[in-house]
Image: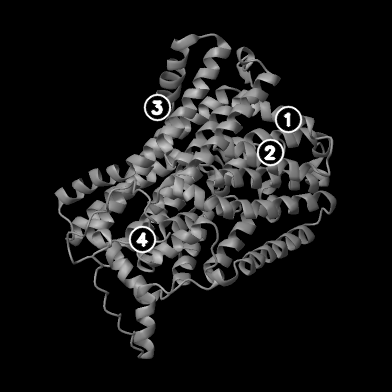
Amino acid sequence: MKKNLVKNLIFAGAVVVYIICCFAMTPLTQAVVMDGDTAVGSLWSLLPPIVAIGLALITKEVYSSLFIGILSGAVIGAVALGTGFEGVMTYVVNEGLIANAADSYNVGILVFLVVLGAIVALMNKAGGSRAYGEWAARHIKTRAGANLSTFLLGVLIFVDDYFNCLTVGSVMRPVTDKHKVSRAKLAYLIDATAAPVCIIAPISSWAAAVSGTVEGVNGIQLFISTIPYNLYALLTLIMVLFISITNVDYGSMRIHERNAIQGDLFSGSRKTYQEEDKPSTSKGKVVDLIFPVLLLIAACVVGMLYTGGLFAGESIVDAFANCDASVGLSLGSLGALLIIILYFLLRGVLKFNECMDSLVSGFKQMVPAILILVFAWTLKSMTNRLGAGEFVKGLVENATAVQILLPMLLFLVALGLSFATGTSWGTFGILIPIVTSVFSGQLADVETTGIPTMVIICISACLAGAVCGDHCSPISDTTIMASTGAQCDHVTHVSTQLPYALTVAGVSALGYLLSGFVQNVFVVLGVSVVLMIGVLFVIRLLLGDDNKALPESPSSAAASQKKTGAVAPAKPAAPAKSSSSAGGKKKRKK
């Protein structure tokens, strides 16, 4: 109780200090200055996400925290523009919740989310998930194997981060649950192989987004050039491999992992997703999961290529660069859903009314994610309306004089902006044009001289920082999708992931500091990788006695005993209940 009170007081004090700084820099009545159609913001513009994120981490309640953040942004905008109470309600309802829920891109993502929930419900009802879990239990013997399987599947599905999070989660939940991997750890594995993989994959929706932000340069060529310098993404993959193989966890994640071994996959946190449908038949086979997943992947890829103009004569690379991920995922998932329903009917594992019931069940499972997404989108639009992008852009332009420190500064600014706004695409959409304008003289003859190394490093720093902030932010779409895919409490996922993400961020910042002095990819990447591995071994050493490998999961222990012929020692008889113990109950250590 006292600990929570101290946290609340510290947060309240920090917010008060921040507001005082806002008043010192700009009066509230001048918090937003309209320059044509652009809002030129001030320090006030970052207050709503700070309030929302701080409240979410302290109260562990994401819905009310996001709404309070939205409301604070509406109040700031109304006071600054003199629109009064009517303006507050307009910003929250009309221009906030309704506008974002009705946005065509957002609706496409919601359609994809609901359809994927329906497909997962169908696979569960048909017994495909259970059959796959039983098959995986026979072939994946250890916790490390379950973690690595999740990692490999995440790397293979590199087309889109939303698609990655939800597909990997639905496929791997039965496997990780079988080996007593906590839902918090599963959510981290999903999140760490979503955006970090997409940002280094030339054929992905992320490559398309990045290539569209640079004018006068071949966007795909520039994107490929940034991959070796994208330190955060590469180091995150190294970290995931390290902790998956060694079972070394730290921070609150370690508590979740130890509790999972004892059978509590959620560590007592509130379950925000309803229980999955139980199979209605015993005829389910592994193919009843594999076929729908492969069909969904193929259909979504075709859908994205279709929106990019592949069937109108565009090349595959250009089609990905021009695709509309929202429409493509919606088209692909809806087409896959129809074929999957027909497949289960022909297989005789589901009846028509059971298929229709699964559609409703899948929608219900996605309601928490839909609510969080709509609130997060509204908070982002509120922050943009207050001019956060223009405010940060001005700060960066003033800092471009020190070019040696520019990569590290861009990384840190991108991290902060992406964390506060919850959007990595919006972040590099703001910062990359600044970089190209700073180096416009060197880019004038790029077809002859090639893209300067410093430009590549600075753009890589923007991309890495944007992904890092997106990875840490509670209001990020990808973070929300990772929680949804793992069916993990959202705030639990954020709080357990932060120590890992910040560890990689610290090493990445040092790498970008080095890159300002030594513009050589082998030196920068090599030193960063060695430093990352060194930090992980130091953490392992500092854990000391607590660094012993986590005990085997019951399934792997039983398999080991069966293989060796060893017999587990009999459990001692439970002692008689003492009459002095109230109810005979004991508190479980966390």
Image quadrant for the C terminus? bottom left
Q: Callout 1, which amino acid?
A: Leu
Marks 3 and 1, how far apart at CA? 33 Å
Q: Name the residue under label 2.
A: 413
Q: In this view, does 442 lie above or below 244?
A: above
In the picture, the quarter occupied by the N terminus is top left
Say whether residue 293 is left or right of residue 245: left
Marks 2, 4: nearer the viewer: 4
Residue marked by disc 1:
395
Which residue matches tag 3? Answer: 102
Q: Tags 3 and 2 in contact by the CB under 8 Å rule?
A: no
- Towards the viewer: 428 or 554: 554
Inter-mark Cα distance, 2 to 4: 39 Å
Q: Please state which of residues 16 and 273 is positioned toward the viewer in this rendering.
A: 16
Disc 4, SS: loop
- Amino acid type at mark 3: Ala
Binning the other alpha carbons within 10 Å of mark 2 as few (below 14), some (14 to 19) or many (20 upward) gives many
Q: Position of residue 150 (x, y in %)?
A: 46, 63
Check disc 2 and report its element: helix, strand or loop.
helix
Position of residue 449 in the picture relative to residue 61 (left or right): right
Residue drawn 47% across the image and 19% down it: 91
